[in-house]
Image (cartoon, rainbow, N blue to C red):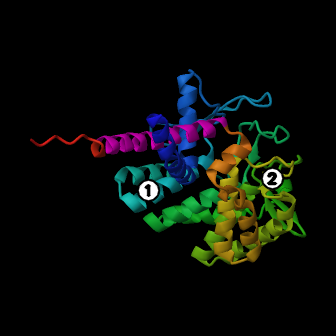
């Protein structure tokens, strides 16, 4: 009976602490826990695009088979540019030479692998991507131009690299090449859409985050270089985005592409972060409006989301947190009772 009373006494405190910890750290802890569970079963979470690094630290991807297409080992300029920007940010904060070297190696790779013609640069992918089978190889990507543009502007700022500045300008010119002419831009009266997977004569998926990455790159170019062409390309991209945003609205969720594929947890975070960045760059209320609307489900407390989604890993995590919080409270109460109830020695 005494034990039961102790359980009851500490349980509300344990629940309250576990609830607070889950709200603060649940999303951070859940994915590592899921990996541990899969490893314990001798399995792994499917990763259709694991990233590796060559002897120069350049990332490459080994793409799995999807839709009957096996891209295999491929270098992807978008991923190289993103890794370069990550290394630059680490170098800015830590000043570690290894981060600077990794950044420089990626920048050199991006310079060598750009396709430049008539002062216009694009990245052409000779391999066939597996997610949208209608888009054949070779294809090009507005998202790639936008990401590499940001990396080249960073290289110019860090190293006074005139070749990087020149490539950034050539990538900007690439935004003025329509899909029909071998580029990635869909030019319409309502604006320009920068396609993530583009090829001549085929239906393209109009991926939301890919277009936004390009627009952000153009806005950064405009702000840093005061370049009129960047201002034009950015404004045309913003016009198209504002026109099409309602088509990506799925209530408190968002669609990933024009085929109404819902964005998963990763891309919800990506797209909402992009919208906040766009609002900060443009001060246009429409981006803040969609940011607030689409982040509402992400702000729901972790425990409530776990219950609503019937998330098994999340439920296990809640149970573990409850045990971790309950056990020291129970032991502490037990020790306190022993100390206070210790019999006094008789005096004679």
Q: Which residue is mark 2?
A: 255
Q: Where does residue 320 sit, x and y in percent of width and height?
A: 52, 37
By secondary structure, the bulk of the magenta-drawn segment is best described as helix
Q: Residues within 10 Å of mark 1 (few under 14, many from 20)?
A: some
Indicate left or right for 301 with 232 as reference: left
Q: Are marks 2 and 1 in contact (CB under 8 Å)?
A: no
Determine if residue 119 is in view. Answer: no
For label 1, the SS is: helix
Q: Where does residue 315 sit, x and y in percent of width and height?
A: 62, 38
Q: Residues within 10 Å of mark 2 (few under 14, many from 20)?
A: many
Q: Magenta residues, as a range?
A: 312-338
Closer to viewer: mark 2 or mark 1: 2
Q: How far, Cα to Cα, is label 2 from label 1?
A: 32 Å
- Residue at 16 percent across and 40 percent down: it is 345
Q: Which quarter of the figure has residue 309? A: top right
Q: Residue furthest front?
A: 348
Q: Where does residue 227 sit, x and y in percent of width and height?
A: 65, 76
Indicate left or right for 310 with 323 as reference: right
For label 2, the SS is: loop
Q: Which quarter of the figure has residue 170? A: bottom right
Q: Where does residue 42 sit, x and y in percent of width and height?
A: 56, 20
Q: Is residue 223 above or below residue 262?
A: below
The foreground one among 117 and 14 is: 14
* Picture mark count: 2
Q: Which numbered disc flags the more N-terminal residue, 2 or 1?
A: 1
Determine if residue 248 is in view. Answer: yes
Q: Is residue 344 above or below residue 93?
A: above
The foreground one among 38 and 150 is: 38
Indicate left or right for 209 with 25 as reference: right
Q: Which residue is mark 1?
A: 90
- Residue at 44 percent across and 49 percent down: it is 102
């Amino acid at each position: 009976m005494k034990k039961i009373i102790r359980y009851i006494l500490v349980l509300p405190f344990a629940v309250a602490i576990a609830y607070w910890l889950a709200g603060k750290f649940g999303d951070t802890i859940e994915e590592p826990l899921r990996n541990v569970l899969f490893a314990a079963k001798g399995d792994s979470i499917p990763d259709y695009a694991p990233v590796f690094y060559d002897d120069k630290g350049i990332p490459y991807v080994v793409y799995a088979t999807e839709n009957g297409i096996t891209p295999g080992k491929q270098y992807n300029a978008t991923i190289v540019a993103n890794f370069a920007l990550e290394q630059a940010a680490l170098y800015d904060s830590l000043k570690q030479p290894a981060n600077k070297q990794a950044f420089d190696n990626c920048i050199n790779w991006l310079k060598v692998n750009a396709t430049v013609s008539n002062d216009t640069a694009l990245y052409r992918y000779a391999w066939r991507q597996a997610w949208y089978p209608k888009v054949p190889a070779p294809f090009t990507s507005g998202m790639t131009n936008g990401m590499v543009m940001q990396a080249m502007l960073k290289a110019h700022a860090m190293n006074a690299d005139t070749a990087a500045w020149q490539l950034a300008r050539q990538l900007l010119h690439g935004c003025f090449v329509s899909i029909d002419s071998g580029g990635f831009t869909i030019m319409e009266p309502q604006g320009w859409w920068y396609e993530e997977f583009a090829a001549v004569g085929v239906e393209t998926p109009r991926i939301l985050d890919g277009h936004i990455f390009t627009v952000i790159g153009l806005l950064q170019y405009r702000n840093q270089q005061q370049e009129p062409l960047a201002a034009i390309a950015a404004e045309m991209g913003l016009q198209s985005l504002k026109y099409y945003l309602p088509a990506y609205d799925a209530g408190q969720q968002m669609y990933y592409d024009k085929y109404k594929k819902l964005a998963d947890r990763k891309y919800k975070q990506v797209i909402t972060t992009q919208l906040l960045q766009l609002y900060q760059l443009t001060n246009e209320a429409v981006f803040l409006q969609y940011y607030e609307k689409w982040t509402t489900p992400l702000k729901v407390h972790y425990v409530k989301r776990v219950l609503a989604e019937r998330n098994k890993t999340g439920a296990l995590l809640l149970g573990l947190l409850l045990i971790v919080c309950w056990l020291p409270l129970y032991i502490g109460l037990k020790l306190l009772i022993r100390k206070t109830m210790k019999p006094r020695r008789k005096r004679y």
